[in-house]
Image (cartoon, helix red, strand yellow):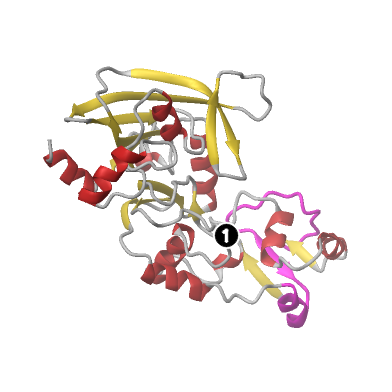
Amino acid sequence: MYQIEIRENEAGQRLDKFLHKFMPLAPTAFFYKMLRKKNITLNGKKAEGREKLNVGDTISFYLSEETLKGFQKDDQVNDEYERAYHTLKGISVVYEDEHVLIMNKPAGILSQKAQASDLSLNEWILGYLLDHGKITKEQLSTFRPSVCNRLDRNTIGLVIGSKSLFGSQQINELISSRQIRKFYRMFVKGQVLKEETLEGYLIKNERTNTVQITKNKSDKNASYIKTRYYPIRQFRDRTLVEAELITGKTHQLRIHMASIGHPLLGDYKYGDRNWNNQYKQQYHIDSQLLYACRLETPKLEAPLSSFGERAIEAPVPEVFIKLMADS
């Protein structure tokens, strides 16, 4: 017999979903057959699979070791997590509690894998938690901490990660209900003189990985977008702007600012190539200069109360400091 005691990271999910994570190679029919025959029990009793797991529950497997291992994947990915933690440079943790991890991501690092061979912030999180003894390899078989929001590869700044299943569920709900406010800073072309709110509908071209704005909300592929922006400081040919991303869609800030004649500095996809080239030559800027500078959270109940009512800020990137010194 093999037993598992449910910990906080496994609690809150259905028994059948937990079993799929624990033995990912087993077919669904196998689990229900074993539950019917009481070869898998919950707290010593027959279970159906729909039960919600609580901390302290015990799942017993009256299965051979050979059967258990046959339905589990060989965990060779831990080396990948360690490699990501030690090779992806410049990532720092700016906030951490029992359930949440906020990281400052430099440009050039993916939030999540685009291809199987990639190393991303997702793998870095797991390497960090394993290296610091905050999670064990065994715990990864039933829950894997991960990022909750994404930034483009070349966007700098704050990314939210979950350390627990509860944290993942709660943070994703806060993001989807727009209760976590997300602010970005960027240099844009020209003089921005007043605060404005932009709205529209965004259509993505998957083949070219580009987007365009339309006012036609009847288009079935169009997603509503909303951005609020305001100037921080004007310079000779550019303005430092802060924007609140009220909705979060692919390339939203880049296309919204370009659509009103204020493209982002360094944005070769939607911006002004000649203007970008001038700064590329002087400052070596070759991608959109954009950073997720601040997160603001609402008041939250325990156990997330320590994460509530916070304004979490990223350090100002070095290239922004240089550009602010050059009037």
Q: Which residue sits furthest bottom?
A: 66
Going 64% across and 77% down the picture, which residue do you hit?
A: 74
Left or right relative to 318: residue 24: right
Please name the amino acid that badge 1 sits on: Phe
Q: Nearer the viewer, residue 93 or 302?
A: 93
Question: What kind of element bears circle 1?
Answer: loop
Q: Is residue 285 magenta?
A: no
Percent of width and height locating residue 169: 55, 44
Percent of width and height locating residue 147: 48, 51
Residue 136 lies, with reference to residue 321, above or below; the image says: below
Q: Quadrant of the N terminus?
A: bottom right
Going 39% across and 36% down the picture, which residue do you hit?
A: 271
Q: Which residues are magenta?
A: 43-71
Left or right relative to 280: residue 62: right
Q: Could you tell me if residue 245 is visible in this image? A: no
Percent of width and height locating residue 189: 29, 31
Left or right relative to 60: residue 167: left
Q: Quadrant of the C terminus?
A: top left
Residue matched to label 1: 143
Q: Nearer the viewer, residue 196 or 238?
A: 238
Going 66% across and 63% down the picture, which residue do you hit?
A: 58
Q: Nearer the viewer, residue 104 or 17?
A: 104
Q: Main secondary structure of the magenta part?
A: loop
